[in-house]
Image: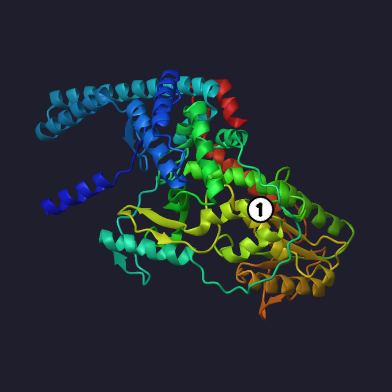
């Protein structure tokens, strides 16, 4: 048993993820050392005839060596346990003495021992009270400092003190596909691999659709240094690294040396129309959805960790693709577009519903739910769609190269699974994926517009969240039929169980809308993009929900808002 426990403990220690300690990386003297060492090493390693894979490997090796030397390494932290700030040696000693005197009094039952125990109890209570006040004073001073220095750390410190449920603790075992528990680490890894392999590789049921190119994309200038500099600048900080272990902070710390070297890698990738293998790989971390059994794989959402340098390259491609396709995209698509957002879609639908009631009309609405929309994208069809929208030549080849041999592995409590190919869908976590997806959806929704009223806009979209509305029930049914047929051609599938219809009018009326001979559920209330819409177009339910949400947050912040050690200015900042 002891040998088994030692082996298990050693296995868990070996599985801890070792990462670069980036807490020192913003210090000016550290950055100067990194820049100097990087400049010297890169000059020695530079060979013009190296391909993009070799160039990337050299850059990664040099950068990781510099970071390890000057910043050091640490282990990735898991779920943080809640710590009591006031618990220290003084409190621990006072409670220990109290317990010992209590045991002595229980044995003797003498008055002298009871007086000693009572005094120790009072002393321990006084010490705890003093230490609690000290910890709150220090916490208030820390909040006041962070409020000025770092808004991110400020809100992070607040989040730690909020009243919440117990922190998530990963399950020691999971269930197989039959619901039976698995304890062996090898089988746990195999089960996670099996689940995500099935989830991310959806069989092709679409029909090959022919497209006629409408645009010409003849000029293909090389990637500019300014594009690379902007991509590095826009890369967010404090994000987990991909398989290469390099973060955006590390690239930014290299200054112009980093910009020059990353530009050289991008230039090689552009010329060769291929990308390094690390850019094609994703490490998936399962995150519990906070509902359902922790032992079931289906209650977890996969978060993909990609190479940060690869994401910078994808951002450069995204900035070149967007100006080409933006004029062609439907104005009803509010997702992932500059100057548009979910508030615009909510406002538009709110205006439609209110005007319908005002003019005593009837509006029939269908809220379409696409089943696993991002994962169902057929890549062969996607390349044809992109070409139809004007994306050609090297630009298209570079996008395809990212997806050409894409692989994933799952980081589990039992270690990393085997790598497996991913052949469908757009990549989760990639900056290019949202744009590719809305282009794909735009091609789907442009269905036989001649059969509908082309002068009237009858839909709202936010990525895959689609809302179709018509005054006439027959037109709504026709529109849904056309959309369903188009989805099948593109390997997409409408989720009939989650797709619902609603009628907005002064008097409730039943309607019968079907998909594949199955009647859609009619509701009197629907939450669209986080806002509640009702069949009578009133705002009562929306207001009640917002009040409840505000009350929940206020309750969670009660210890901070009520404590006198927190300055009023800081409390005002929290509320704002």
Residue 200 sits above or below residue 413 on the image: below
The residue tagged with tag 1: helix, strand or loop? loop
Tag 1 residue: 529
- Front residue of 58/463: it is 58
> Where in the figure is residue 293, as x and y percent of width and height?
40, 60
Q: Is residue 222 left or right of residue 13?
A: right
384 on left or right of 308: right
Q: What residue do we see at 46% from left, 55% from top?
A: 302
Extreme residue in the front direction: 49
The residue drawn where x is 33% and y is 63% is 190
Q: Specify the farthest residue to the left.
A: 108
- Furthest residue toward right: 359
Front in this rendered view, residue 128 or 144: 144
Residue 524 visible (yes or no): no
Report the front residue among 321 and 102: 321
Image quarter where the C terminus lies is top right
User: In which quadrant is the N terminus drawn?
Assistant: bottom left
């Amino acid at each position: 048993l002891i040998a088994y426990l030692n082996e298990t403990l050693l296995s868990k220690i070996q599985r801890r993820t070792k990462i670069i300690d980036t807490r020192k990386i913003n210090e000016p003297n550290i950055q100067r050392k990194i820049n100097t060492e990087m400049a010297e090493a890169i000059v020695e390693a530079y060979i013009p005839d190296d391909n993009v894979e070799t160039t990337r490997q050299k850059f990664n090796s040099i950068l990781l060596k510099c970071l390890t030397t000057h910043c050091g390494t640490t282990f990735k932290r898991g779920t943080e346990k809640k710590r009591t700030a006031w618990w220290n040696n003084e409190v621990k000693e006072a409670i220990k003495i109290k317990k010992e005197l209590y045991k002595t009094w229980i044995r003797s039952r003498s008055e002298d021992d009871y007086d000693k125990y009572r005094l120790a109890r009072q002393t321990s209570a006084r010490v705890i009270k003093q230490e609690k006040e000290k910890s709150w004073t220090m916490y208030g001073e820390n909040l006041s400092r962070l409020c000025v220095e770092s808004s991110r750390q400020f809100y992070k410190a607040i989040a730690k003190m909020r009243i919440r449920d117990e922190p998530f603790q990963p399950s020691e075992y999971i269930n197989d596909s039959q619901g039976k528990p698995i304890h062996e680490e090898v089988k746990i890894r195999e089960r996670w691999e099996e689940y995500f392999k099935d989830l991310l590789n959806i069989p092709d049921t679409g029909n090959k659709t022919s497209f006629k190119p409408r645009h010409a994309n003849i000029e293909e200038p090389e990637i500019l240094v300014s594009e690379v500099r902007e991509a590095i600048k826009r890369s967010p900080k404090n994000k987990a690294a991909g398989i290469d272990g390099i973060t955006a902070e590390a690239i930014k710390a290299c200054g112009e040396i980093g910009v020059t070297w990353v530009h050289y890698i991008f230039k090689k990738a552009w010329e060769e129309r291929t990308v390094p293998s690390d850019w094609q790989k994703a490490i998936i971390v399962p995150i519990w959805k906070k509902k359902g059994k922790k032992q079931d794989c289906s209650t977890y959402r996969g978060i993909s960790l990609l190479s940060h340098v690869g994401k910078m390259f994808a951002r450069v491609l995204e900035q070149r693709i967007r100006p080409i396709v933006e004029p062609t995209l439907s104005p009803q698509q509010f997702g992932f577009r500059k100057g548009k957002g979910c508030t615009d879609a909510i406002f538009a639908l709110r205006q439609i519903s209110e005007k319908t009631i005002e003019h005593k009309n009837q509006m029939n609405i269908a809220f379409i739910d696409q089943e696993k929309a991002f994962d169902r994208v057929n890549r062969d069809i996607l390349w044809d769609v992109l070409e139809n929208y004007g994306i050609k030549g090297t630009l298209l080849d570079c996008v395809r190269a990212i997806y050409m041999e894409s692989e994933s592995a799952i980081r589990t409590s039992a270690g990393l699974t085997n790598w497996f190919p991913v052949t469908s869908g757009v990549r989760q976590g990639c900056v290019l994926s949202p744009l590719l997806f809305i282009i794909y959806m735009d091609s789907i929704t442009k269905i036989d517009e001649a059969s509908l009223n082309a002068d009237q806009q009858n839909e709202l979209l936010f990525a895959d969240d689609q809302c179709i509305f018509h005054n006439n029930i027959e037109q709504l049914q026709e529109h849904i039929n056309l959309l369903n047929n188009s989805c099948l051609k593109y390997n997409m599938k409408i989720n009939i169980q989650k797709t619902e219809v609603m009628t907005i009018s002064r008097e409730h009326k039943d309607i019968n809308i079907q998909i594949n001979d199955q009647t859609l559920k009619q509701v009197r209330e629907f939450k669209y993009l986080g806002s509640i819409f009702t069949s009578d177009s009133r705002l009562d339910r929306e207001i009640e929900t917002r009040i409840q949400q505000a009350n929940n947050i206020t309750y969670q912040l009660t210890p901070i808002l009520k404590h006198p050690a927190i300055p009023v200015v800081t409390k005002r900042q929290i509320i704002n």
